Amino acid sequence: INCFTSLILSLSRFLSISEIPLVLIKEKKTWREALRYCRENHVDLVSVHTEGIQRWVKTVARNASTDNVWVGLRHTCDLNWIWSDGSNSSYRNWKPNEPNNNGCDNCAELKHEDGDGKWNDAGCHWKKQFICYKGEKYEVINMVHLLDLQFIHF
């Protein structure tokens, strides 16, 4: 571990997952409209990289009036499942037997109505509420990066 990594890991112990600034948007929009809204008014649709972030997103989603909310994961024929912010993560939280639509235009929704917060693939044209990162992009990306680092084991 180099000095910088040690410093980052030390600082990450003082952050909690609930410090990631998220906002539930209660307007119903298609996935693309939600993405545009988040980027114009906040930062981006939320990306879920760890179980800790998943729990926080699920907590925020409980206040939605729709059964499902959009997150920033989308399927494309060329790239498979990708996060809207371009970040990489192997973490997935699909419901059993999901994704199952296998289409080129599917997006991920977090299903909170049954309390488990698992993901489902749905047509991106459906209108749903959604969760954005809130705040300055630089601050949010750095905070998420710090929180991701605390799950790395050396």
Image: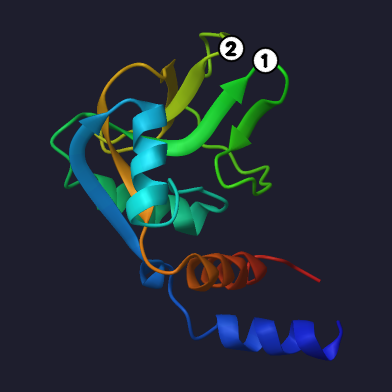
For mark 1, give the secondary structure: loop
Tag 2: Cα neighbours inside 10 Å, few (<14), some, or many (≥20)?
some
Residue at the (57%, 51%) spot, across then down:
49
The answer to whether residue 113 shows anywhere in this view is: no
Residue at the (28%, 56%) spot, across then down:
23
- On the image, numbered disc 1 is attached to which residue? 77
User: What amino acid is labelled 1 in the image?
Assistant: Cys
Q: Out of 99 and 127, give the one closest to the viewer.
A: 127
Q: Out of 61 and 116, give the one closest to the viewer.
A: 61
x and y percentages locating residue 69 in the rendered image: 30, 35
The answer to whether residue 7 shows anywhere in this view is: yes
x and y percentages locating residue 59 in the rendered image: 28, 53
For mark 2, give the secondary structure: loop
- On the image, numbered disc 2 is attached to which residue? 104
- In the image: residue 19, left or right of residue 113: right
Q: In this picture, is 140 found above or below 75?
A: below
Residue at the (50%, 73%) spot, across then down:
139
Quarter holding the N terminus?
bottom right
The picture quadrant where one finds residue 148 is bottom right
Quarter holding the C terminus?
bottom right
